[in-house]
Amino acid sequence: MVLLAARTLVSAVRPPYPYGEELVSQFLFVLKLSWFPMTISIFALCFGAVGLQASGILELFGALDRLGGIFVVTAIRFIGPIVTAAILAGVAGTAITADLGARKIREELDALQVLGVDPIKNLVVPRFLALMVVTALLNIYAIVFGLTAGIAASILYDEPLGGFFATLFSNVLITDLWGSVLLCTIFGGIIAVVCCYKGMTASGGPAGVGRAVNQAVVIAYMGNFAFLNVFTSLLLAFNPELQTIR
Amino acid sequence: MSVGRSIGWLDAPRVWLDGAGEVARFGSNVASQVFSGRVLRFFGESVRQAGILIFGSALIIWAFVFILGLQCGLIGAYFSRSIGAPGNAGLFSAFCDLREGLPYAFGYIFSAKVGTGIVAELGAMRISDEIDALEVMGIPPLTFLAATRLLGAWIAIPFLYLVGIGIGYLASWFAVVEQVGDVSSGGYLLIFWMYQNPLDVLFSLTKAMVMATIIVSVGCYYGYTASGGPVGVGTATAKSMAVNIILVNIIGMLGTLIFYGANPRAPIGG
Protein backbone atom coordinates (compact mmCIF):
# COMPACT_ATOMS: atom_id res chain seq x y z
CA MET A 1 0.00 0.00 0.00
CA VAL A 2 2.86 2.37 0.84
CA LEU A 3 4.42 1.40 -2.46
CA LEU A 4 1.19 2.24 -4.26
CA ALA A 5 1.03 5.59 -2.46
CA ALA A 6 4.59 6.44 -3.45
CA ARG A 7 4.05 5.41 -7.07
CA THR A 8 0.82 7.39 -7.17
CA LEU A 9 2.54 10.53 -5.90
CA VAL A 10 5.41 10.20 -8.36
CA SER A 11 3.06 9.44 -11.20
CA ALA A 12 0.84 12.42 -10.32
CA VAL A 13 3.61 14.98 -10.72
CA ARG A 14 5.56 13.45 -13.58
CA PRO A 15 4.39 14.47 -17.07
CA PRO A 16 2.45 13.63 -19.17
CA TYR A 17 -0.88 14.38 -17.53
CA PRO A 18 -3.48 12.34 -19.40
CA TYR A 19 -5.93 12.12 -16.52
CA GLY A 20 -7.74 15.45 -16.70
CA GLU A 21 -11.05 14.14 -18.01
CA GLU A 22 -11.09 11.18 -15.63
CA LEU A 23 -10.27 13.53 -12.77
CA VAL A 24 -13.33 15.65 -13.49
CA SER A 25 -15.61 12.65 -13.88
CA GLN A 26 -14.33 11.11 -10.64
CA PHE A 27 -14.73 14.41 -8.86
CA LEU A 28 -18.37 14.65 -9.93
CA PHE A 29 -18.93 10.97 -9.20
CA VAL A 30 -17.72 11.29 -5.61
CA LEU A 31 -19.60 14.53 -5.11
CA LYS A 32 -22.86 13.10 -6.43
CA LEU A 33 -22.53 10.07 -4.21
CA SER A 34 -21.58 11.90 -1.06
CA TRP A 35 -23.57 15.11 -0.81
CA PHE A 36 -26.73 13.51 0.52
CA PRO A 37 -25.18 11.26 3.21
CA MET A 38 -22.99 14.17 4.26
CA THR A 39 -25.92 16.52 4.78
CA ILE A 40 -28.00 14.09 6.80
CA SER A 41 -25.14 12.67 8.85
CA ILE A 42 -23.43 15.88 9.82
CA PHE A 43 -26.71 17.50 10.73
CA ALA A 44 -27.79 14.52 12.82
CA LEU A 45 -24.46 14.22 14.60
CA CYS A 46 -24.01 17.91 15.35
CA PHE A 47 -27.63 18.37 16.35
CA GLY A 48 -27.81 15.33 18.60
CA ALA A 49 -24.36 14.81 20.00
CA VAL A 50 -23.20 18.39 20.31
CA GLY A 51 -26.24 20.62 20.11
CA LEU A 52 -28.56 18.80 22.48
CA GLN A 53 -26.00 17.52 24.98
CA ALA A 54 -24.13 20.80 25.26
CA SER A 55 -27.32 22.88 25.35
CA GLY A 56 -28.64 20.71 28.14
CA ILE A 57 -25.57 21.38 30.28
CA LEU A 58 -25.29 25.03 29.31
CA GLU A 59 -28.93 25.67 30.07
CA LEU A 60 -28.35 24.48 33.63
CA PHE A 61 -25.60 27.07 33.91
CA GLY A 62 -27.74 29.68 32.17
CA ALA A 63 -25.01 30.15 29.59
CA LEU A 64 -26.64 29.04 26.35
CA ASP A 65 -24.91 31.80 24.41
CA ARG A 66 -21.67 29.84 24.86
CA LEU A 67 -22.89 27.16 22.46
CA GLY A 68 -20.97 28.81 19.62
CA GLY A 69 -17.67 28.33 21.41
CA ILE A 70 -18.39 24.67 21.96
CA PHE A 71 -19.22 24.24 18.29
CA VAL A 72 -15.79 25.55 17.39
CA VAL A 73 -14.13 22.93 19.56
CA THR A 74 -16.35 20.04 18.52
CA ALA A 75 -17.90 20.67 15.13
CA ILE A 76 -14.92 22.25 13.39
CA ARG A 77 -12.03 20.50 15.10
CA PHE A 78 -13.50 17.09 15.72
CA ILE A 79 -16.81 16.08 14.20
CA GLY A 80 -16.45 17.74 10.81
CA PRO A 81 -13.32 15.78 9.86
CA ILE A 82 -14.60 12.56 11.48
CA VAL A 83 -17.89 12.57 9.61
CA THR A 84 -16.27 13.62 6.36
CA ALA A 85 -13.79 10.77 6.65
CA ALA A 86 -16.45 8.24 7.65
CA ILE A 87 -18.80 9.18 4.82
CA LEU A 88 -16.13 9.45 2.16
CA ALA A 89 -14.62 6.11 3.13
CA GLY A 90 -17.99 4.45 3.52
CA VAL A 91 -19.70 5.83 0.44
CA ALA A 92 -17.11 6.97 -2.09
CA GLY A 93 -14.27 4.67 -1.03
CA THR A 94 -16.42 1.55 -1.18
CA ALA A 95 -17.77 2.59 -4.59
CA ILE A 96 -14.22 3.04 -5.87
CA THR A 97 -13.13 -0.34 -4.52
CA ALA A 98 -16.17 -2.04 -6.02
CA ASP A 99 -15.53 -0.34 -9.36
CA LEU A 100 -11.81 -1.16 -9.54
CA GLY A 101 -12.41 -4.63 -8.13
CA ALA A 102 -14.96 -5.30 -10.85
CA ARG A 103 -12.45 -4.24 -13.48
CA LYS A 104 -9.81 -6.45 -11.93
CA ILE A 105 -12.15 -9.46 -11.91
CA ARG A 106 -13.17 -8.83 -15.52
CA GLU A 107 -9.44 -8.55 -16.33
CA GLU A 108 -9.91 -5.06 -17.68
CA LEU A 109 -6.86 -3.87 -15.75
CA ASP A 110 -4.66 -6.49 -17.42
CA ALA A 111 -6.11 -5.47 -20.77
CA LEU A 112 -5.20 -1.85 -20.09
CA GLN A 113 -1.65 -2.88 -19.29
CA VAL A 114 -1.42 -4.87 -22.50
CA LEU A 115 -2.60 -1.80 -24.41
CA GLY A 116 0.27 0.13 -22.84
CA VAL A 117 -1.95 2.24 -20.57
CA ASP A 118 -0.55 2.65 -17.09
CA PRO A 119 -3.39 1.84 -14.65
CA ILE A 120 -1.78 3.86 -11.88
CA LYS A 121 -1.56 6.99 -13.94
CA ASN A 122 -4.95 6.63 -15.57
CA LEU A 123 -7.03 5.12 -12.79
CA VAL A 124 -5.42 5.65 -9.41
CA VAL A 125 -4.01 9.15 -9.79
CA PRO A 126 -7.29 10.82 -10.81
CA ARG A 127 -9.14 9.12 -7.94
CA PHE A 128 -6.40 10.09 -5.52
CA LEU A 129 -6.45 13.76 -6.51
CA ALA A 130 -10.23 13.89 -6.78
CA LEU A 131 -10.75 12.37 -3.34
CA MET A 132 -8.24 14.74 -1.73
CA VAL A 133 -9.98 17.78 -3.22
CA VAL A 134 -13.50 16.52 -2.56
CA THR A 135 -12.73 15.58 1.05
CA ALA A 136 -11.32 19.02 1.74
CA LEU A 137 -14.29 20.72 0.10
CA LEU A 138 -16.86 18.51 1.77
CA ASN A 139 -15.25 19.31 5.09
CA ILE A 140 -16.21 22.94 4.56
CA TYR A 141 -19.68 21.77 3.61
CA ALA A 142 -19.76 19.64 6.78
CA ILE A 143 -18.78 22.62 8.92
CA VAL A 144 -21.52 24.73 7.36
CA PHE A 145 -24.17 22.11 8.03
CA GLY A 146 -22.77 21.41 11.48
CA LEU A 147 -23.19 25.07 12.34
CA THR A 148 -26.72 24.93 10.90
CA ALA A 149 -27.40 22.15 13.36
CA GLY A 150 -26.05 24.35 16.13
CA ILE A 151 -28.41 27.11 15.06
CA ALA A 152 -31.28 24.61 15.09
CA ALA A 153 -30.36 23.54 18.62
CA SER A 154 -30.22 27.18 19.73
CA ILE A 155 -33.66 27.81 18.26
CA LEU A 156 -34.99 24.67 19.93
CA TYR A 157 -33.95 26.09 23.29
CA ASP A 158 -35.53 29.47 22.47
CA GLU A 159 -32.19 31.21 22.50
CA PRO A 160 -31.56 34.34 20.39
CA LEU A 161 -28.87 33.60 17.83
CA GLY A 162 -26.72 36.63 18.61
CA GLY A 163 -24.88 34.87 21.41
CA PHE A 164 -24.23 31.80 19.29
CA PHE A 165 -22.64 33.80 16.50
CA ALA A 166 -20.73 36.09 18.87
CA THR A 167 -19.00 33.24 20.72
CA LEU A 168 -18.56 31.32 17.48
CA PHE A 169 -16.71 34.09 15.71
CA SER A 170 -14.71 35.19 18.71
CA ASN A 171 -13.43 31.65 19.30
CA VAL A 172 -12.75 30.35 15.82
CA LEU A 173 -9.24 30.88 14.53
CA ILE A 174 -7.75 30.49 11.10
CA THR A 175 -5.62 27.71 12.57
CA ASP A 176 -8.77 25.73 13.35
CA LEU A 177 -9.95 25.98 9.78
CA TRP A 178 -6.72 25.16 8.05
CA GLY A 179 -6.11 22.36 10.50
CA SER A 180 -9.48 20.90 9.69
CA VAL A 181 -9.04 21.24 5.94
CA LEU A 182 -5.47 19.92 5.90
CA LEU A 183 -6.55 16.95 8.00
CA CYS A 184 -9.33 16.16 5.57
CA THR A 185 -7.07 16.45 2.54
CA ILE A 186 -4.82 13.81 4.05
CA PHE A 187 -7.86 11.69 4.92
CA GLY A 188 -8.84 11.79 1.26
CA GLY A 189 -5.38 10.60 0.28
CA ILE A 190 -5.49 7.72 2.78
CA ILE A 191 -8.96 6.63 1.64
CA ALA A 192 -8.01 6.76 -2.03
CA VAL A 193 -4.81 4.76 -1.62
CA VAL A 194 -6.38 2.09 0.58
CA CYS A 195 -9.48 1.69 -1.57
CA CYS A 196 -7.60 1.67 -4.87
CA TYR A 197 -5.11 -0.84 -3.54
CA LYS A 198 -7.79 -3.18 -2.27
CA GLY A 199 -9.77 -2.83 -5.49
CA MET A 200 -6.79 -3.49 -7.73
CA THR A 201 -5.72 -6.55 -5.78
CA ALA A 202 -9.20 -8.11 -5.51
CA SER A 203 -9.21 -11.79 -6.30
CA GLY A 204 -10.89 -15.05 -5.45
CA GLY A 205 -14.13 -15.47 -7.31
CA PRO A 206 -17.53 -14.06 -6.42
CA ALA A 207 -16.70 -13.33 -2.80
CA GLY A 208 -13.51 -11.52 -3.78
CA VAL A 209 -14.87 -8.09 -4.62
CA GLY A 210 -17.18 -8.04 -1.62
CA ARG A 211 -14.38 -9.06 0.68
CA ALA A 212 -12.10 -6.43 -0.87
CA VAL A 213 -14.70 -3.74 -0.14
CA ASN A 214 -15.06 -5.00 3.41
CA GLN A 215 -11.31 -4.91 4.08
CA ALA A 216 -10.89 -1.57 2.35
CA VAL A 217 -13.47 0.20 4.46
CA VAL A 218 -12.16 -1.28 7.70
CA ILE A 219 -8.56 -0.34 6.92
CA ALA A 220 -9.58 3.13 5.76
CA TYR A 221 -11.51 3.73 8.99
CA MET A 222 -8.72 2.53 11.23
CA GLY A 223 -6.09 4.47 9.31
CA ASN A 224 -8.13 7.64 9.31
CA PHE A 225 -8.96 7.55 12.98
CA ALA A 226 -5.43 6.70 14.05
CA PHE A 227 -4.17 9.57 11.93
CA LEU A 228 -6.86 11.85 13.35
CA ASN A 229 -5.67 11.19 16.86
CA VAL A 230 -2.03 11.88 16.05
CA PHE A 231 -2.90 15.01 14.10
CA THR A 232 -5.17 16.44 16.81
CA SER A 233 -2.52 15.80 19.47
CA LEU A 234 0.09 17.62 17.44
CA LEU A 235 -2.20 20.47 16.39
CA LEU A 236 -3.36 21.21 19.92
CA ALA A 237 0.04 20.76 21.50
CA PHE A 238 1.89 22.97 19.01
CA ASN A 239 -0.72 25.72 18.82
CA PRO A 240 -1.29 26.95 22.35
CA GLU A 241 -3.36 29.86 21.09
CA LEU A 242 -6.11 27.32 20.34
CA GLN A 243 -6.39 26.65 24.05
CA THR A 244 -7.69 29.97 25.26
CA ILE A 245 -11.34 30.74 25.21
CA ARG A 246 -12.37 34.24 24.31
CA MET B 1 -14.21 5.25 -18.77
CA SER B 2 -17.49 3.90 -17.61
CA VAL B 3 -17.64 5.32 -14.12
CA GLY B 4 -19.44 8.56 -14.77
CA ARG B 5 -22.21 6.48 -16.27
CA SER B 6 -25.57 7.98 -15.60
CA ILE B 7 -25.40 8.71 -11.92
CA GLY B 8 -27.43 11.82 -11.29
CA TRP B 9 -27.41 14.28 -8.44
CA LEU B 10 -30.61 12.84 -7.00
CA ASP B 11 -29.58 9.19 -7.24
CA ALA B 12 -28.03 9.16 -3.77
CA PRO B 13 -31.23 10.10 -1.91
CA ARG B 14 -33.32 7.88 -4.16
CA VAL B 15 -31.14 4.81 -3.60
CA TRP B 16 -31.12 5.53 0.10
CA LEU B 17 -34.88 5.93 0.46
CA ASP B 18 -35.46 2.88 -1.68
CA GLY B 19 -32.98 0.84 0.34
CA ALA B 20 -34.30 2.02 3.71
CA GLY B 21 -37.86 1.02 2.81
CA GLU B 22 -36.89 -2.38 1.46
CA VAL B 23 -34.64 -3.02 4.45
CA ALA B 24 -37.44 -2.12 6.86
CA ARG B 25 -39.69 -4.73 5.25
CA PHE B 26 -36.94 -7.34 5.08
CA GLY B 27 -35.68 -6.60 8.58
CA SER B 28 -39.10 -6.90 10.18
CA ASN B 29 -39.50 -10.21 8.37
CA VAL B 30 -36.20 -11.45 9.78
CA ALA B 31 -36.98 -10.13 13.26
CA SER B 32 -40.33 -11.92 13.22
CA GLN B 33 -38.45 -15.14 12.45
CA VAL B 34 -36.40 -14.54 15.58
CA PHE B 35 -39.27 -13.50 17.82
CA SER B 36 -41.56 -16.32 16.76
CA GLY B 37 -38.84 -18.72 17.87
CA ARG B 38 -38.53 -20.32 14.45
CA VAL B 39 -34.85 -19.47 14.54
CA LEU B 40 -34.37 -21.72 17.57
CA ARG B 41 -34.38 -24.64 15.19
CA PHE B 42 -30.95 -23.38 14.15
CA PHE B 43 -29.79 -22.26 17.56
CA GLY B 44 -26.41 -23.91 17.06
CA GLU B 45 -25.88 -21.86 13.94
CA SER B 46 -26.80 -18.68 15.86
CA VAL B 47 -24.23 -19.44 18.51
CA ARG B 48 -21.69 -20.12 15.79
CA GLN B 49 -22.47 -16.73 14.22
CA ALA B 50 -22.05 -15.07 17.62
CA GLY B 51 -18.71 -16.82 17.95
CA ILE B 52 -17.61 -15.65 14.51
CA LEU B 53 -18.63 -12.13 15.48
CA ILE B 54 -16.58 -12.24 18.66
CA PHE B 55 -13.48 -13.88 17.24
CA GLY B 56 -13.53 -12.06 13.94
CA SER B 57 -14.58 -8.55 14.83
CA ALA B 58 -14.13 -7.91 18.53
CA LEU B 59 -10.51 -6.83 18.34
CA ILE B 60 -11.11 -4.40 15.51
CA ILE B 61 -14.18 -2.92 17.21
CA TRP B 62 -12.29 -2.49 20.46
CA ALA B 63 -9.28 -0.96 18.74
CA PHE B 64 -11.54 1.55 17.02
CA VAL B 65 -13.32 2.35 20.28
CA PHE B 66 -9.93 2.79 21.95
CA ILE B 67 -8.92 5.38 19.37
CA LEU B 68 -12.19 7.24 19.83
CA GLY B 69 -11.72 7.20 23.60
CA LEU B 70 -8.28 8.72 23.15
CA GLN B 71 -9.75 11.39 20.93
CA CYS B 72 -12.54 12.22 23.42
CA GLY B 73 -10.07 12.46 26.24
CA LEU B 74 -7.73 14.63 24.23
CA ILE B 75 -10.38 17.10 23.09
CA GLY B 76 -11.90 17.12 26.57
CA ALA B 77 -8.59 17.79 28.28
CA TYR B 78 -7.72 20.71 26.02
CA PHE B 79 -11.26 22.08 26.14
CA SER B 80 -11.29 22.03 29.93
CA ARG B 81 -7.90 23.68 30.00
CA SER B 82 -9.21 26.43 27.73
CA ILE B 83 -12.06 27.31 30.08
CA GLY B 84 -9.59 27.38 32.96
CA ALA B 85 -10.97 24.32 34.70
CA PRO B 86 -8.66 21.46 33.74
CA GLY B 87 -10.02 19.36 36.58
CA ASN B 88 -13.35 19.16 34.75
CA ALA B 89 -11.98 17.12 31.85
CA GLY B 90 -14.05 14.26 33.23
CA LEU B 91 -17.28 16.04 32.31
CA PHE B 92 -16.46 16.28 28.64
CA SER B 93 -15.06 12.78 28.36
CA ALA B 94 -17.96 11.23 30.30
CA PHE B 95 -20.44 12.78 27.90
CA CYS B 96 -18.33 12.21 24.83
CA ASP B 97 -17.50 8.60 25.65
CA LEU B 98 -20.61 7.03 27.02
CA ARG B 99 -23.44 9.11 25.64
CA GLU B 100 -22.36 9.93 22.12
CA GLY B 101 -18.94 8.84 20.97
CA LEU B 102 -19.02 5.16 21.77
CA PRO B 103 -22.37 4.39 20.10
CA TYR B 104 -21.29 6.25 16.98
CA ALA B 105 -17.86 4.67 16.89
CA PHE B 106 -19.44 1.29 17.45
CA GLY B 107 -21.99 1.91 14.71
CA TYR B 108 -19.37 3.04 12.21
CA ILE B 109 -16.97 0.18 12.74
CA PHE B 110 -19.74 -2.38 13.08
CA SER B 111 -21.21 -1.37 9.74
CA ALA B 112 -17.74 -1.35 8.18
CA LYS B 113 -16.56 -4.67 9.56
CA VAL B 114 -19.67 -6.75 10.17
CA GLY B 115 -22.26 -5.15 7.88
CA THR B 116 -20.18 -5.28 4.73
CA GLY B 117 -18.80 -8.64 5.79
CA ILE B 118 -22.31 -10.09 5.85
CA VAL B 119 -23.09 -8.62 2.44
CA ALA B 120 -19.94 -10.09 0.96
CA GLU B 121 -20.63 -13.49 2.49
CA LEU B 122 -24.33 -13.77 1.67
CA GLY B 123 -23.82 -12.13 -1.71
CA ALA B 124 -21.26 -14.76 -2.63
CA MET B 125 -23.71 -17.48 -1.56
CA ARG B 126 -26.47 -15.93 -3.67
CA ILE B 127 -24.23 -15.62 -6.71
CA SER B 128 -23.04 -19.20 -6.50
CA ASP B 129 -26.68 -20.36 -6.07
CA GLU B 130 -26.07 -21.72 -2.61
CA ILE B 131 -29.19 -19.99 -1.27
CA ASP B 132 -31.34 -21.73 -3.88
CA ALA B 133 -29.64 -24.98 -2.93
CA LEU B 134 -30.64 -24.43 0.69
CA GLU B 135 -34.22 -23.95 -0.38
CA VAL B 136 -34.15 -27.14 -2.39
CA MET B 137 -32.85 -29.01 0.63
CA GLY B 138 -35.87 -27.82 2.60
CA ILE B 139 -34.04 -25.38 4.86
CA PRO B 140 -35.71 -21.95 4.94
CA PRO B 141 -32.80 -19.74 3.82
CA LEU B 142 -34.14 -16.57 5.40
CA THR B 143 -34.23 -18.23 8.80
CA PHE B 144 -31.00 -20.12 8.39
CA LEU B 145 -28.92 -17.25 7.02
CA ALA B 146 -30.43 -13.96 8.15
CA ALA B 147 -32.30 -14.72 11.37
CA THR B 148 -29.41 -16.70 12.84
CA ARG B 149 -27.08 -13.81 12.19
CA LEU B 150 -29.46 -11.40 13.86
CA LEU B 151 -29.84 -13.64 16.89
CA GLY B 152 -26.08 -14.16 17.00
CA ALA B 153 -25.55 -10.41 17.00
CA TRP B 154 -28.08 -10.00 19.79
CA ILE B 155 -26.29 -12.65 21.82
CA ALA B 156 -22.83 -11.19 21.35
CA ILE B 157 -23.31 -7.42 21.16
CA PRO B 158 -24.17 -6.57 24.79
CA PHE B 159 -20.98 -8.17 26.04
CA LEU B 160 -18.89 -6.83 23.20
CA TYR B 161 -20.22 -3.35 23.73
CA LEU B 162 -19.87 -3.30 27.49
CA VAL B 163 -16.23 -4.35 27.19
CA GLY B 164 -15.91 -1.65 24.54
CA ILE B 165 -17.19 0.95 27.01
CA GLY B 166 -14.50 -0.12 29.45
CA ILE B 167 -11.85 0.14 26.78
CA GLY B 168 -13.06 3.58 25.76
CA TYR B 169 -12.92 4.73 29.38
CA LEU B 170 -9.39 3.40 29.72
CA ALA B 171 -8.36 5.28 26.58
CA SER B 172 -9.89 8.55 27.81
CA TRP B 173 -8.20 8.16 31.15
CA PHE B 174 -4.93 7.55 29.36
CA ALA B 175 -5.31 10.64 27.17
CA VAL B 176 -6.35 12.99 29.98
CA VAL B 177 -4.13 11.82 32.81
CA GLU B 178 -1.05 10.45 31.07
CA GLN B 179 -0.88 12.33 27.76
CA VAL B 180 -2.03 15.85 28.65
CA GLY B 181 -1.55 15.51 32.39
CA ASP B 182 -3.35 18.61 33.70
CA VAL B 183 -5.27 16.66 36.29
CA SER B 184 -4.49 13.87 38.69
CA SER B 185 -6.01 10.47 38.20
CA GLY B 186 -8.22 10.77 41.28
CA GLY B 187 -9.46 14.23 40.37
CA TYR B 188 -10.30 13.12 36.86
CA LEU B 189 -12.11 9.99 37.95
CA LEU B 190 -14.14 11.85 40.59
CA ILE B 191 -15.73 14.14 37.99
CA PHE B 192 -15.85 11.36 35.42
CA TRP B 193 -17.94 9.03 37.56
CA MET B 194 -20.05 11.87 38.90
CA TYR B 195 -21.40 12.63 35.43
CA GLN B 196 -22.78 9.23 34.64
CA ASN B 197 -24.95 6.57 36.17
CA PRO B 198 -26.11 3.07 35.26
CA LEU B 199 -29.11 4.38 33.36
CA ASP B 200 -26.75 6.15 30.96
CA VAL B 201 -25.04 2.85 30.28
CA LEU B 202 -28.43 1.33 29.51
CA PHE B 203 -29.26 4.19 27.12
CA SER B 204 -25.91 3.85 25.42
CA LEU B 205 -26.36 0.10 25.09
CA THR B 206 -29.86 0.62 23.67
CA LYS B 207 -28.48 2.88 20.97
CA ALA B 208 -25.79 0.35 20.13
CA MET B 209 -28.25 -2.55 20.01
CA VAL B 210 -30.63 -0.68 17.71
CA MET B 211 -27.72 0.24 15.45
CA ALA B 212 -26.48 -3.35 15.41
CA THR B 213 -29.95 -4.68 14.57
CA ILE B 214 -30.34 -2.26 11.69
CA ILE B 215 -26.83 -2.90 10.40
CA VAL B 216 -27.30 -6.67 10.40
CA SER B 217 -30.66 -6.28 8.65
CA VAL B 218 -29.15 -4.02 6.02
CA GLY B 219 -26.25 -6.40 5.52
CA CYS B 220 -28.53 -9.42 5.18
CA TYR B 221 -30.87 -7.61 2.79
CA TYR B 222 -28.17 -6.46 0.41
CA GLY B 223 -26.39 -9.80 0.54
CA TYR B 224 -29.59 -11.81 0.14
CA THR B 225 -30.73 -9.82 -2.88
CA ALA B 226 -27.34 -9.44 -4.59
CA SER B 227 -27.35 -10.10 -8.31
CA GLY B 228 -25.19 -9.61 -11.34
CA GLY B 229 -22.17 -11.79 -10.80
CA PRO B 230 -19.04 -11.05 -8.75
CA VAL B 231 -19.32 -7.39 -9.70
CA GLY B 232 -22.83 -7.23 -8.25
CA VAL B 233 -21.56 -8.39 -4.88
CA GLY B 234 -19.08 -5.55 -4.76
CA THR B 235 -21.71 -2.99 -5.73
CA ALA B 236 -24.15 -4.34 -3.16
CA THR B 237 -21.46 -4.14 -0.48
CA ALA B 238 -20.73 -0.52 -1.33
CA LYS B 239 -24.45 0.34 -1.37
CA SER B 240 -25.05 -1.30 2.00
CA MET B 241 -22.31 0.82 3.54
CA ALA B 242 -23.85 4.00 2.17
CA VAL B 243 -27.25 3.11 3.61
CA ASN B 244 -25.81 1.99 6.93
CA ILE B 245 -23.82 5.07 7.66
CA ILE B 246 -26.78 7.40 7.34
CA LEU B 247 -28.97 5.14 9.45
CA VAL B 248 -26.33 5.02 12.18
CA ASN B 249 -26.22 8.79 12.39
CA ILE B 250 -29.99 9.13 12.40
CA ILE B 251 -30.39 6.52 15.15
CA GLY B 252 -27.75 8.30 17.20
CA MET B 253 -29.59 11.60 16.88
CA LEU B 254 -32.99 10.10 17.67
CA GLY B 255 -31.53 8.30 20.67
CA THR B 256 -30.11 11.52 22.03
CA LEU B 257 -33.39 13.33 21.44
CA ILE B 258 -35.38 10.65 23.22
CA PHE B 259 -33.03 9.96 26.11
CA TYR B 260 -31.54 13.37 26.81
CA GLY B 261 -33.67 15.86 24.90
CA ALA B 262 -35.85 16.88 27.83
CA ASN B 263 -33.45 16.11 30.66
CA PRO B 264 -29.68 16.55 30.40
CA ARG B 265 -29.20 14.18 33.37
CA ALA B 266 -26.28 16.10 34.83
CA PRO B 267 -25.66 16.59 38.55
CA ILE B 268 -25.77 20.37 38.38
CA GLY B 269 -28.13 22.57 40.36
CA GLY B 270 -31.29 21.04 41.82
Image (tube, helix red, strand yellow):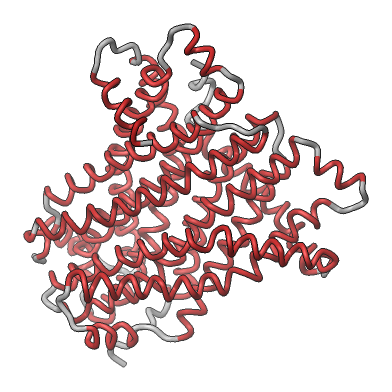
Count of labels in the image: 0
Residue A135 horizontal/vertical position (percent): 32, 38
Would you place residue A240 above or below residue A139 in this image? below
Would you place residue B66 above or below residue A106 in this image? below
Left or right of residue B90: residue B164 = right
Q: Farthest residue toward the front?
A: A3
Tell me where residue B40 sits by quadrant: bottom right
Left or right of residue B52: residue B183 = left
Residue B232 horizontal/vertical position (percent): 65, 32
Which residue is painted at 22% across and 86% down in the image? B187
Viewer-nearest residue: A146 or B130? B130
Would you place residue B102 above or below residue A136 in this image? below
Viewer-nearest residue: A203 or A70? A203
Which residue is painted at 23% across and 20% down in the image? A13
Left or right of residue A126: residue A242 = left
Tell me where residue B28 sits by quadrant: bottom right
Q: Farthest residue toward the top?
A: A115
